[in-house]
Image (cartoon, rainbow, N blue to C red):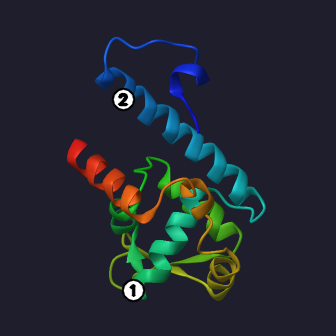
Amino acid sequence: MGDLAKDINSKFENNRVKAMLNIIYTANWITSCQNEFFKDFGISPQQYNILRILNGAGEPLNVQTIKDRMLERSPNATRLMDKLCAKNYIKRLPSDHDRRVVKIVITDEGKTLLNSIPKDFNNELLKNLNEVEAEQLSNLLDKMR
């Protein structure tokens, strides 16, 4: 099992400081693991999130709605969507009534990509937690926010 104090060779003034640093360290570890996983699919975790949002919506969404639903609020969401458009995973649908309004929809290619990605890819990251511990962790993180 991991031990933050050993991993970063440090001591902490109290458990709250240790907890905060552990959250940051663990978040970076998760991000690194996810970046590595999604490389094989040619997308980033943020792009996966956009595809997942669009697929779940079942209808075209405007860019702001997608940004609001993203797990990681990304100021470069438009750039992420540009890359997904270039790969033909999503499509922009301009409005007939207002050219400032653009909706985004997932394409069949985007759905095919999503279906090729194992749904349980995060399970490996949580393998050391049982269901009760995972619920406790989730509740504690909710309480912190």
**Residue 95 appears in which quarter of the rendering?**
bottom left
Amino acid type at mark 1: Asp
Q: Quadrant of the N terminus?
A: top right
Query: Which of 49/22 is in front?
Result: 22
Q: Is residue 14 above or below residue 24?
A: above
Q: Is residue 145 visible?
A: no
Q: Residue at x 63, y 53 (%)?
A: 34
Residue 102 lies, with reference to residue 125, above or below; the image says below
Q: Residue at x 63, y 56 (%)?
A: 44
Relative to 90, say whether 136 is above or below.
above
Front residue of this view, candidates 10 and 91 = 10
Q: Dot 2: few (<14), some (14–19), or many (≥20) neighbours within 10 Å? A: few
Mark 1 highlights which residue?
96
Horizontally, residue 67 falls left or right of residue 54, namely left
Report which quarter residue 13 is drawn in. Answer: top left
Is 64 situated left or right of 35 in this image?
left
